[in-house]
Image (spheres, rainbow, N blue to C red):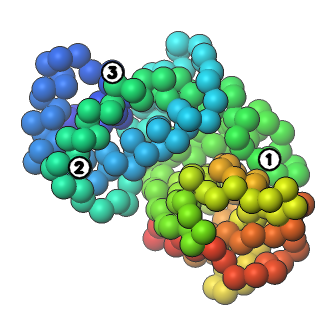
Amino acid sequence: MSNDLHGLLAPYALDALDADERSGFESHLDQCETCQAELPGLVETLSRVGESESATPPPALRSSVLAAVSTMPQQRPVVSLDSRRRLRRTLPQLVAAAAVVAAMVGGGFAAIEHDNVSDMRADQERVTAIISAADATTTSGNVSTGGTLRVISSKSHSAAVVSGSSLKELPGDKVYQLWTMHHGIPKDAGLLGTKDGMVYVPKLGDAVAVAVTVEPQGGSKEPTGEPVAVTDLAT
């Protein structure tokens, strides 16, 4: 796999390549299992973010977002050639999603729940550090009630960014709560909200997984029911 061509994956997903670059990258994509594995997860993330809310970030943020996303390894199954071609036909519609990603990284963050000791600006800086870390890795898993849990973690920062997408909307008196799992012992990691959301999780320590439970509004000190999702942290 060419590292130079692999670095074009995120611009390709954002429809930011010129005709020659696109043609060259698509030839590479047909042969590169790593890029084949990463592309669906990247498209899924951009699609979900693009549906959240509209935003118009400063143009200077675009290049920094591309750089951050392009260095983020994904652990995804290889998809078929037909599936990848269907994805390609939808890519031009994701340009608007890139603006929202930039807004989240650079100044929006309406979807992120903040912990009790961090203000919004600090969380923005921390999340940017996680997704751009050299050792950032992504794992994901299904939620039993519907949807996907995605975890971007960095060992060097001992922290993670956790997002839920396409989650079943809960009634107003319930909330999705995150837990880090420390060899069977759960520790509160924040609230995702009643539907989709994103949380910055600091101080992972010896955590080996992230779990989600449905709890009363406001959260619980410990899980009151069985997890609806458990996603292992990358090792």
Element class at badge 3: loop
Which residue carries the number 1 mark? 114
| Neighbour tally class for label 2: few under 14, some 14-19, many 20 plus, Cα within 10 Å | few
Which residue type carries mark 3? Ala
Query: Distance of mark 1 from mark 2, alpha carbons?
Result: 37 Å
Q: Would you name the residue on which mark 3 appears?
A: 16
State whether residue 224 is above or below residue 166: below
Q: Between residue 19 and residue 154, name the one nearer to us.
A: 19
* Residue at left offset 30%, top offset 62%: 77
Percent from the top left, x then y, of residue 145? 60, 69
Q: Earlier in the sequence, mark 3 or mark 1?
A: 3
Q: Amino acid at mark 1?
A: His
Of badges 1 and 2, nearer the viewer stands 2
Left or right: 122, with 40 as reference point: right
**Residue for point 53% across, 60% down:** 148
The residue tagged 2 is 83
Q: Secondary structure at mark 2?
A: helix
